[in-house]
Every structure is written in C-alpha cells, then in structure tokens.
Amino acid sequence: MKVPFGQEWKNPNSVFDFPKLKLEKDEKARIVIIDEQPECEYVHTLRKVITDERGKPLMEEKKRKDDSTYEVPQTEFKGQYICLGEMETLLNKNIDPDNCPACKAATENSGAVARPEPRFVLNVLKYNLKKGTTTVNTPFQVTLHAWVFTLNRFNTLKDIANEHGSLQNVDLLLGPVEGPLMYQKFPVALGSKCEAWSSESRKETAFAVIQNDREEDLTPLLGRRVTFGELQTVVYEIVSAYNEAFGIPGNLPATPSKPAKEEPSIDVSALLNSSGAVEESSEDEDVSSEEGDDGSEPEAEDLNKLLASLGQ
C-alpha cells in the first residue's frame, strides 16, 4: 500500500520498546505515578527443567535466610503467559484449572508448572536527579516509564495510598537495589512533595511528556496473550520434560473441560479489598517517610481531568 508522509505511523509492537523502570547498581530514583490505577493480569511464569547428557536434571544449590542450603533443578525460562482463567475465579481462588491448561497442569504437577501470580503495570514519570541523591536537577526534566511489579510491591503501594491518599499527588523515592539487580528489590520511601506539580512551568513540562509518550495499554509487558492451543502446547513440552527428567510415568497435562473465553483485565479495586492470600515469592520492601511540607499539588481528580483533556 502507499502511505502519505503526513500520516502518523505506529508500530504495533512499539509497547515492547517502551522504557521500563529499572534501577541500576547504587542508583536512587524519584518518581510520580501517573495512572489512577495499575493494569493487572494473572501471569504464568513457565520454566523448563534442564537435563544432562543422561537425561537427568541438573541441580543447583540455593540458600535460605537462615543460611541452610537446599537443591532445586536448573531451569530454562520459557516465557510469561497471561492466564486464560476467568477473572472472577482467579480473584476468588487464584487458579482456574477448568479454563486454563497451565492452571490445570499446576494442579496436577506443581513441580513442573507454577500457579499464576498477579502482575501489575502503570505509567510513571521519572525525574532527572542530581547524581547520588533524590534531589531534582536543573533544568527540570522527566521521562515516562512503565513500572511492572508484583503483588508484594502492590501491597506496599496500597499501604502508602491508604495512609497518604492518591499516589498521583506524591513522589516516591526508590532505591538503591538490595541484592542482585535482576530482582529489583529496593526500598520505597515517601517524598516530601510532588515536584512535578510544584510550579506551572514544571506542570507544563510534565504534561508535554505525558501527552507525547504515554502508552495507553501496557498489559503486553506483563506477559504473552496466546490462544488456548498455543499455551497448551508450551505446557505439554514443559511437563513432558519434567516427567522424563524425574522418571515420572504418564501424568501429562490433561485437557481442561472447556476452552477459555476472552475476559477483561482484573478490576484492581477487587484486589484492594482482597485478603491478599496469593502465594508469591518474597520481595522485601521498606516504606519510610521523608520529612517536609506537603507542597502544592493538584488533587487526584483534577489530575485525571487534565489527563483526560490530553485525549488519552
């Protein structure tokens, strides 16, 4: 087809190029959350056991918090996939074996396939800071990032919101990273004010960035959304490899009773009111408060009206 130069071209895969919020070694960051609520999906993280030339699983040693050790099989990361279960069932039971082949496999062989876990994503503005500090640099600059996080992080942010109100009106101080960078475990502290809304010139700068760079749908960053048959094929490969490595006869993933149907994203407000009983790998986080005045920031309702006025 012919395309005029005046037409705006949007790559359908552009969301995967969207910058994610990741802290480097010894880095401190200052951010403000832009979205009123995060997007959320239940996600299966799938891993395939690695074997030696004899077909036996390769094992690696892990250390507990008390310094005792244990062994687990080495695995190859096979991807993160959006769970095909019905959202109401997932919110109530955290698993839906009747509609998702990965959930079905997790109930029959939890060693091979793990249960789904909720993952969250939202847009944040990240400030340009003076090196080694959380002080905003001059001239004022911000960049837009996607922050992907787990239920533990969500609960931390929920506690801050319950105590201090809308997270769109406060800055969060992050870092530095504790432990390996890949796990992105860092403390979250409350800033004294929201620097982005502290003056009219800063507001103009921040909203220009939001208008130009904001991504409306970040859910593809949470995991791959595939068909029932595609997910079942990946699950079959993983369970077959696990059973062969550990000498387990049969026990291949059974076909769920019915194919999954399309469902909307999770209502995050339901998780706000949930008991938080989802099992998830631990993620240590500290929440502290930075002393200082509240500053002058727009109310969350006003911020959302401004965002809506941008045509997003």
Image: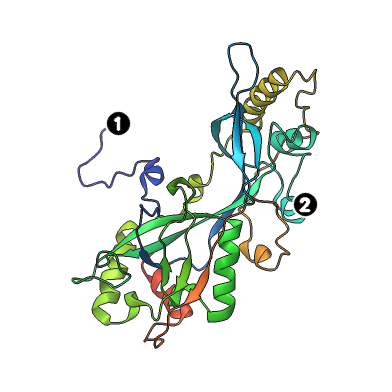
Mark 2 closeness class: few <14, some 14–19, many ≥20 residues within 10 Å: few
Q: Quadrant of the C terminus?
A: bottom left
Residue nearest the viewer, comparing 253 with 257: 253
State the mark number for residue 93: 2
Q: Which residue is drawn at 24% across and 67% down?
A: 130
- Amino acid tagged 1: Met
The percent position of residue 183, horizontal first and vertical second, equals: 49, 49
Residue marked by disc 1: 1
Q: Residue extending furthest front?
A: 67
Q: Quadrant of the N terminus?
A: top left
Q: Which residue is drawn at 40% across and 43% down?
A: 16
State the mark number for residue 284: none
SS at circle 1: loop
Side (left or right) of 33 relative to 43? left
Side (left or right) of 59 relative to 127? right
Question: Residue 171 lies in what quarter of the image?
Answer: bottom left
SS at circle 2: helix
Q: Earlier along the polypeptide chain: callout 1 or callout 2?
A: 1
Q: Residue at x 56, y 59 (%)?
A: 284
Side (left or right) of 274 relative to 131? right
Q: Residue at x 47, y 51 (%)?
A: 179
Question: Residue 78 lies in what quarter of the image?
Answer: top right
**Vertical arrangement, residue 303 with respect to residue 244, above or below:** below
